Image: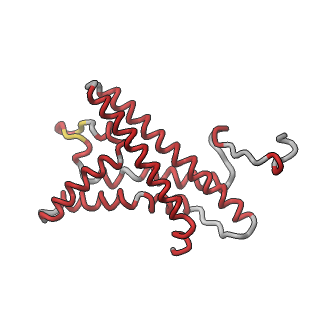
Amino acid sequence: MKAFLRDHSYDAVKMFLNQFATAVFGFVLALAAGKAQNAVLRNVTSGFAIAFYLFLLYTMTWEIGFRDKIAVDNGRKPSKPLTGLWISLLANSVNFLFGIFIMLASLTNVSVFGKIGGVCASAALLLEGMYTGVLANHVAADTPLNSFWWIYLLLPIPAMVTCLVAYILGTKDKKFTGLFKFRYPESDRDPKEK
C-alpha cells in the first residue's frame, strides 16, 4: 500500500483536480441551460461535460498504463492490471465519503448526521458538477435524482470503470482511435514509421 501511494498519489491528486475543473465546467453549463429552462439542452450539456470528464480520465489513465507497460516489459515492475481502478478509487475517496454521510443522514435520525449530510450533499453537487444537469431530471413523483442518497454512491462508478479499462488498454498498447496514439521521439521510432 505504501509503494502504491508513493507511486500513484500524484496521479490520484491530478485525477481529483481534473474532476474539480470539469465539475465547475459542467456546473456552469447546467446553470446556463437551467436559465434557458430547457431540459433537453440541460441534459445535452451535462452529457457533454460527463463525456469530456471521462475522456480526460481515459487519456490520463491510458498514459499511466503505457508507462507501466514499459516498466513491466523491462522487468522493473510486476504487472497489476487493477492499478487504474485503485488510482480512481483513491481519487474518488472524497466522493464516496460524501456519499456515506449523505446515506447516514437519509437513513438515520441522528441530527449530527443530518447536518453533516446536508453540507456533504451541497459539496457533492459542486464536486460532481458535470452530472448536475442529469441529476436535475425528475423521476418518480416529481422527485429529482439528486434527492436519492444512493445516487451519490453510484456517481464515481463511471470514472472507476473508465480508469480500469484505460489502464488495461494502456498496458497492452491498444487504443480506441488514433487520438490516443503515443508518439515516440524521432530517435526511438521504428524505421517503418518514419
Where is 137 relative to 98, above or below?
A: above
In the shown orientation, is residue 183 left or right of residue 188? left
In the shown orientation, is residue 13 left or right of residue 137? right
From the viewer's side, name the closer residue of 84 and 16. Answer: 16
- Residue at the image position 75 percent from the left and 66 percent from the top: 74
Where residue 183 sits, quadrant-wise, is: top right
In the shown orientation, is residue 16 left or right of residue 194? left
Quadrant location of the C terminus? top right
Q: Residue furthest bottom?
A: 2
- Residue at the image position 67 percent from the left and 48 percent from the top: 174
From the viewer's side, name the closer residue of 42 and 184. Answer: 184
Could you say where residue 33 lies in the image, as x and y percent from the top left? 31, 29
Could you say where residue 144 lies in the image, as x and y percent from the top left? 23, 40
Could you say where residue 28 lies in the image, as x and y percent from the top left? 34, 36
Colour setup of the view = secondary structure
Where residue 116 sits, quadrant-wise, is: bottom left
- Residue at the image position 30 percent from the left and 51 percent from the top: 124
- Residue at the image position 30 percent from the left and 57 percent from the top: 99
All told, the count of numbered labels is 0
Could you say where residue 76 lies in the image, as x and y percent from the top left? 71, 70
